[in-house]
Amino acid sequence: MCWSATADLVAGTAITAVGVACVAQARRVRDLPLAALPLLLGAHQIIESVIWRSGGGTGPATIAWAVIALPLLPLWVPLGVLCAAPPHARRRLLVPLAAGVATAVALAHCLATRTVTAEIRGHTLGYVLGLPRSGLLVGGYLLATVGSLLLSGDRLLRRLGVLVAVGAAACAALWRLEFISTWCAFAAVCSVVLLGWTRRRPVEQNV
């Protein structure tokens, strides 16, 4: 998340543009889910700019934000990595994918049975859902997203996994301090890394 509606909108537009470039430069159909990830991240930021302008609450924008952040991302990332992975890495990637499926199902159930609320807290937005067993869900989420990147068998994606892990820790620390979030800059950096990844992918690869 960013620190204002304008910051979210600018960051979201830039990240979406990077996503368009990633998809345009993807050379294999198998790479498209991961190449399209910046499009999802950019949309996420733009949706949050709407939440800022509406003053938070429980409206459609808040629900859309939560759907992307909670059940969709832990499923999208490991599935995208699995699709793009070399043959020797695919078996081990079933572990983070299974974690992603289980986490996504649990989070989707929470969204279907609970109310998510966005709250403006100074320079940040907070989202309240009241997740049960939050530690377990966070662990599954990180295994699905960070774990899949680290186990991808691709050097650049492993570096992205390290970046995601460090960025998530930094964002969590700043969030606890109710300080300006670094998430928008972090998402932008991740999107640029994915753009570099799509440019380096071979036109054809044995599967």
Image (tube, rainbow, N blue to C red):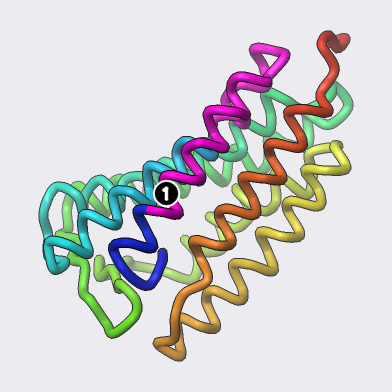
**Vertical comparison of 184 with 135: above or below:** above
Could you say where residue 112 lies in the image, as x and y percent from the top left?
A: 19, 47
Q: In this view, does 140 lie to the left or right of 164?
A: left
**Which residue is rendered at x = 39% and y = 45% of the image?**
71
Could you say where residue 100 lies in the image, as x and y percent from the top left?
A: 53, 43
The magenta stretch spans residue 22: yes
Q: Is the magenta stretch mostly helix, strand or loop?
A: helix
Tag 1 residue: 12
The magenta stretch spans residue 98: no
**Which residue is rendered at x = 83% and y = 9% of the image?**
204
Three-letter code, disc 1:
Gly
- Which quarter of the figure is the N terminus placed in? bottom left
Residue 105 showing in the rendered view: no
The segment highlighted magenta reads 10-36
Front-most of residues 100 and 196: 196
Secondary structure beneath dot 1 equals: helix
Could you say where residue 199 lies in the image, as x and y percent from the top left?
A: 77, 27
**Vertical comparison of 12 with 171: above or below:** above
**Which residue is rendered at x = 59% and y = 31% of the image?**
79
Front-most of residues 5 and 206: 5
Could you say where residue 153 lies in the image, as x and y percent from the top left?
A: 86, 37
